[in-house]
Amino acid sequence: MAERVGRFTVKMSKKPSIIGFAASGGKKEKSGPIGDLLDKSFDDDLLGQDSWEQAESALLCNSISLALKKAELKNDQADVIFAGDLLDQSMSSTFGLKQFRIPTVGLFGACSTMALSLSQAALAVDSGWANVAVAATSSHFCSAERQFRFPLEYGGRRTPNSQWTVTGSGATVVGFESRESAPKIDSVCIGRIADLGVTDANNMGAAMAPAAADTIKNFLTDTGTTPDDYDLILTGDLGEIGSRLLQDLLERDGIMLKNNYDDCGLLIFDKDSEVGAGGSGCGCSATVLCAKILPEICKGKLGRVLFVATGALMSPKSAQQGLSIPAVAHAVLITS
Amino acid sequence: MAERVGRFTVKMSKKPSIIGFAASGGKKEKSGPIGDLLDKSFDDDLLGQDSWEQAESALLCNSISLALKKAELKNDQADVIFAGDLLDQSMSSTFGLKQFRIPTVGLFGACSTMALSLSQAALAVDSGWANVAVAATSSHFCSAERQFRFPLEYGGRRTPNSQWTVTGSGATVVGFESRESAPKIDSVCIGRIADLGVTDANNMGAAMAPAAADTIKNFLTDTGTTPDDYDLILTGDLGEIGSRLLQDLLERDGIMLKNNYDDCGLLIFDKDSEVGAGGSGCGCSATVLCAKILPEICKGKLGRVLFVATGALMSPKSAQQGLSIPAVAHAVLITS
């Protein structure tokens, strides 16, 4: 039975494995540093659909189908899907998942969704109430811009500290199996909502850094470990500004992140003026995890990865009302 | 350890209990059939806040605080909160929950959220990874109208088959305790997204009925039971049209819902022209459950209640794109 460690962390009893995983991305993601690692990429941003939102649904379905196939499972062999996205009423997940006819737990964690869904899938499998659980999420540059900023047609100029929403999706299948190389979930740490009063929706990294610091600190305290105990501590999509802020915040508590720290928002795109402070969106940490990190764990290149996806939980309405941006970060310790 | 029963149902091993619960509502809810049963009601629709969305947050916080108090627990004694709402990016939950500083799993299930959150809280406690889990949700007539239909100031005329969003919130605290009268969670059935092509956002009952039929059928099949085995089968907010449609759909499969069937959307308001086909919103099933049903279980008036909250998963954007309304229903069997 899963065991609580300290106040916030839960350690799995049986080490559920990630028995299948897949990442899909768009054209820009394909041309970036992890482009060759994607399972599938699409040159057409619309993926042959009628809207950006439906294109995002197609991206999500593609990743889930691929991940199930790689786990050598049929759709009806999954007991539950945990998924969500950034859009109003999780539109891309809702419309994407209806084709699967699998019991569905809709999640909302904005860009933290990959870690949130993976944590819930791992807990479900470890607890035995699901034999196979899918965890997945997606984002699309065009649906996110229209949702949170301006329709692309406006041609609005972006601020240098804004981040570029990843057109991508990642899916993992959690279960038990004999293949020894499959990455295992060791423990999870569910985050608390943190809000330090940042109101600039173009500076989400700064809004999310305090949540990431809170969760990392909680996890290290609960487990009695230090950053040196991990091969990689990987945040979701803090980007340049948020990553530096996170390091500063943790340093104040005597926690030093060194060379074993990185951020998915800094790994997904080549540095250019268009990208701003880095990648973001649910698909950012999801594609980096599924395309780059999990394969490296399978190959034995990485042993212990603390994956901390971060989410800025603002809505267009809260921004219009001048409210600050609450954020959350969820952590999953994945081991070889 | 929780045990899978059939393809969709999970039976708890230890019968986690609902050790605290509370319901809050607005003025209209106060004057309705369950008005006297509410733990707290507010005459001021804004609850002293600056916006309808923030008023909804206050409603949610009020219910959670009351439920924790009734369970004789402090905030920091809860290990996790499962919550969500109808608004874009779950705005009322996000902004409401940040004050609690408890690990938070954001959910999206639209009006099915009370059953979805209760199912996840029960599974967490039964599995042992949480000792105490909160499940809560809310809706507000004014924030929902502005979100999904028209700002109130337009004074738009409502169709007769539309439903009236409940201004209300319900919260439950799941844990283990010795008080024998506390309602227990026996089993849960997580729903699949169903979409039969209904596109009228003013007829959500019709859109949700197929999902409710699917989940009820799955649960009865998995458990080898019939409607006669329950004191009450209670759907979330199908309203008049959806309830009749559900009965028709189940009848085709030889499942007859009789006098032990009811719908929260028909229980919450007095019948008047304003209300249309009944109540709706996350707060509808949440307030009816927490104000009326759980107390009746405690008093021994009801023994076995199959609570099936239903959610219409459309977004304003999907409606604008002319897409149909996917729906989901989650079931929780609550026993005395």
Image (cartoon, coloured by chain):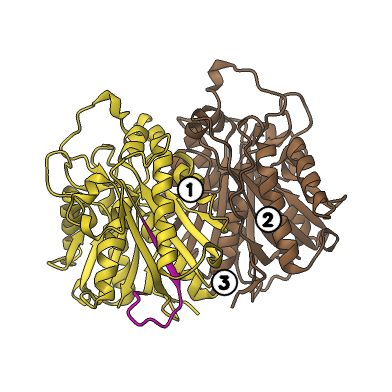
Chain colours: A brown, B yellow
Give the residue at x 68% y 29%.
Answer: A162
Q: How far apart are the alpha carbons under marks 3 and 2?
A: 17 Å
Instruction: Where is residue A328? Give x, y as percent.
Output: 61, 49
Q: Secondary structure at mark 1?
A: helix
Q: Which mark is residue A215?
A: 2
Residue B36, above or below A201: below
Q: How far apart are the alpha carbons under marks 1 and 2?
A: 20 Å
Say which amino acid is labelled 3: Trp
Instruction: Where is residue B270? Give x, y as percent.
Output: 14, 49
Q: Secondary structure at mark 2?
A: helix
Say which amino acid is labelled 1: Gly
Residue bearing mark 1: B96
Disc 1: which chain?
B
The foreground one among B274 and A283 is B274
Residue A46, above or below B251: above
Image quarter where the C terminus of chain A lies is: bottom right
On the same chain, marks 3 and 1? The answer is yes
Q: How far apart are the alpha carbons under marks 3 and 1?
A: 24 Å
Residue B288 placement, left or right of A180: left
Give neighbour class at mark 3: few <14, some 14-19, many 20+ (Cα, 10 Å): many
Q: Residue B206: tell me if it is visible.
A: no
Residue B207 placement, left or right of B82: left
The span shown in magenta is: B170-183
Image quarter where the N terminus of chain A lies is: bottom right
Please tell me in which quadrant of the rendered image residue B293 appears. Answer: bottom left
Q: Earlier in the sequence, mark 3 or mark 1?
A: 1
Q: Which mark is residue B129?
A: 3
